[in-house]
Image: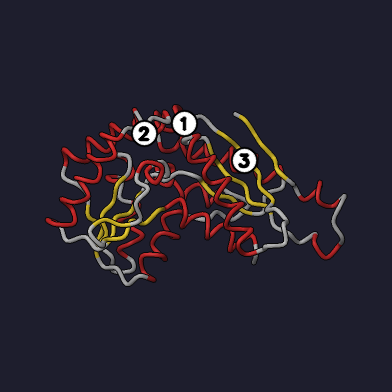
Amino acid sequence: MYVFIYATRKERRESKNESELALKTVGIIGGVGPESTIEYYRQIFACYREEVPDGTAPSIIINSIDVKKVLGLVADKELVQLTDYLASEVQRLSRAGADFAVLAANTPHIVFDEVQQRSSIPLISIVQATCDAAKALGLKRAGLFGTRFTMQAGFYQNVFSREGISIVLPAQSDQAYVHDKYVNELLKNVFLPATHDALLAIADKMIEQERIEALILGGTELPLILRETARQGVPFLDTTRIHVRAVVAQLLT
């Protein structure tokens, strides 16, 4: 476990005047996986500076946890242990001074509600933020890429169904392919042209056969290989970017 703290409120207090002490601090549960956590950090800075162009920086705490442990607990359906683990790591962020927190990955959201119930600080859900974005676009039918756990566990389906939006999954063989490449390549910072092309081919099938209106990139490494913003006019919903904008909105509230 590695905790990285950038510009905490205590440090700011030494150099900022009283009017600026209300700046919020976001805590990030990262490391699941590492590459997307780096992207979160970059994008939060970029998005924040779009909104606050005076050169100031957002206050961020990153708690990088063990991706192997997380995926193992999910695979073994040890969801109580997963909740315990994530809740304890969120509490580390709270003790370090975070005002609110995010899980910088989709798969751990399988126990998001349980972790939120045990957290002393608010959590911003990547699933709810993505649902809000889909609703704003007027979508009714969205495809979903992610790990097998994200695609099959039902937490996307449950949240989106409240807004009348159907979640469409790839065919079983395609789900297996997406999961395999995600776990064995993307999480290890391996981004191959052949995998990129195969993922787009699966997207094409879903667009043409399932008539999806958007494709949710429901894994925070997926936007690192699928840099396109759309396919055949069907938008890709980058859950990392959507989540980041929700984070920055909360920082500035």
- Count the numbered circles shown: 3
Residue shown at 73%/59% (left/top)?
Answer: 23
Say what secondary structure mark 1 lies in. helix
Q: Mark 1 and mark 3: span between their CA atoms? A: 14 Å
Please tell me the numbered disc located at residue 191: 2
Residue in front for this viewpoint, 19 or 113: 19
Residue at (53, 52) in percent of width and height: 117
Instruction: Out of 158 and 130, give the one closest to the viewer.
Output: 130
Residue on which disc 3 sits: 62
Count neighbours of disc 3 (C-alpha within 10 A) and say few if under 14, some if 14 to 19, many if 20 or more.
many
Quarter placement of the N terminus: top right
Neighbour tally class for label 1: few under 14, some 14-19, many 20 plus, Cα within 10 Å: some
**Residue 147 position within the rendered picture, expressed as x and y whole percent measured from the top left:** 32, 39
Which amino acid, mark 1? Val
The picture places residue 184, in percent across and down from the top left corner, at: 34, 28
Q: Are marks 1 and 2 in contact (CB under 8 Å)?
A: no
Q: Is residue 76 visible?
A: no
Foreground residue, 44 or 123? 44
**Which of the two discs, 2 and 3, labels the residue nearer the N terminus?**
3
Q: Amino acid at mark 2?
A: Phe
Quarter occupied by the C terminus: bottom right
CB contact under 8 Å: marks 2 and 3: no
Q: Which residue is mark 1?
A: 67
Instruction: Return the x and y of residue 109 as percentages of the image width and height.
Output: 43, 47
Residue situated in front as seen by the camera: 96 or 138:
138
Residue 41 visible to the viewer: yes
Helix, strand, or loop for circle 2? loop
